[in-house]
Image (cartoon, rainbow, N blue to C red):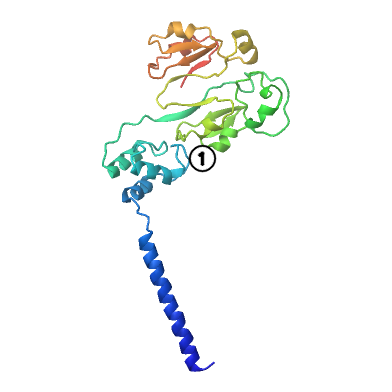
Amino acid sequence: MSVTGILTAAAVVGIVGIFVGLFLGVAGIRFKVETDEREEAVLAALPGNNCGGCGYAGCSGLAAAIAKGEAAPGSCPVGGEAVAKEVARIMGVSAEASRRKVAYVHCQGDCERARTDYDYCGVLDCRMMEFVPGGGPKACGSGCLGYGTCVEACPFDAISVVNGVAKVDREKCKACGKCVEACPKHLISLIPYEARTVVACSSRDKGPVAMKACQTACIGCGICVKNCPSQAVKVEEFHAIIDQEKCTGCGACAEKCPKKAIVSL
């Protein structure tokens, strides 16, 4: 190839490159997606766990919602009050006081207290118990199965299975709600961190049936209701329920409960 041919080819490539560059530059400006600087700042302030506990698809989804005014500054359960205050500062609004919550497993039916109907050998996944006789080997149909589905769902390593029952580490728990969603028995709920008295049972069986299945089952006797000075306890479907908004944590219900189904934390 002659020198002239080489120079011509180089010139053509250069011109094409310049044209493509100009085209991309113009296209970038024309089709640029405007980004709210506050959204980027909020995203940087969030913990980045992408746990979904806020109800959005990760931290970026929550940041976009906060920037648009569709979510409150304190919507991140993981960040807590510190993150809520920082996000509120970025958005130029006041942060509402948030109440810390933790997950709690409402069951005490461990290997000693709960009766089993048979020995189970199979997939160790609580969700699979829907397909086995009686919903699992435990006599109590509402009891924790202890196969750790909630453990796998927790992104903060805050749950462990102890003697056949899931236990939550209150200090590690971020109240993201993943375990609540994962438990097929619906035994886990989010309670106020400062809660001092809880019902550690989820059984709604009548007294004789419940007592036969577990030593610490709630039998719906109502003694807790009669002894609560703040009227924070009620019994529905043979099951005691504590209104944490009314509860003062005096512990009277836990002390009087004949089956010790109510406990003080």
Left or right for 144, reference 35: right
Which residue is at a point 35% across and 52% down the rendered structure image?
Answer: 35
Q: Position of residue 76 (x, y in %)?
A: 40, 38
> Does any portion of residue 49 appear in the rendered image?
no
Q: Residue at x 38, y 9 (%)?
A: 229
The answer to whether residue 258 is left or right of residue 111 is: left
In this orientation, does residue 98 appear? Answer: yes
Q: Which residue is more in the foreground, 63 or 106? A: 63
Residue 32 lies, with reference to residue 129, above or below; the image says below
Q: Nearer the viewer, residue 249 or 233?
A: 233
SS at circle 1: loop
Please state which of residues 228 and 131 is positioned toward the viewer in this rendering. Answer: 131
**What residue is shown with label 1?**
155
Q: Is residue 141 left or right of residue 104?
A: right
Residue 125 at x, y = what percent? 64, 33
Q: Residues within 10 Å of mark 1 (few under 14, many from 20)?
A: some
Task: Return the residue found at the far bottom.
Answer: 2
Residue 230: image location, x then y, percent? 38, 11
Front-most of residues 13 and 128: 13
Using the image, determine if residue 109 lies above or below residue 227: below
Q: Tag 1: residue type?
A: Pro
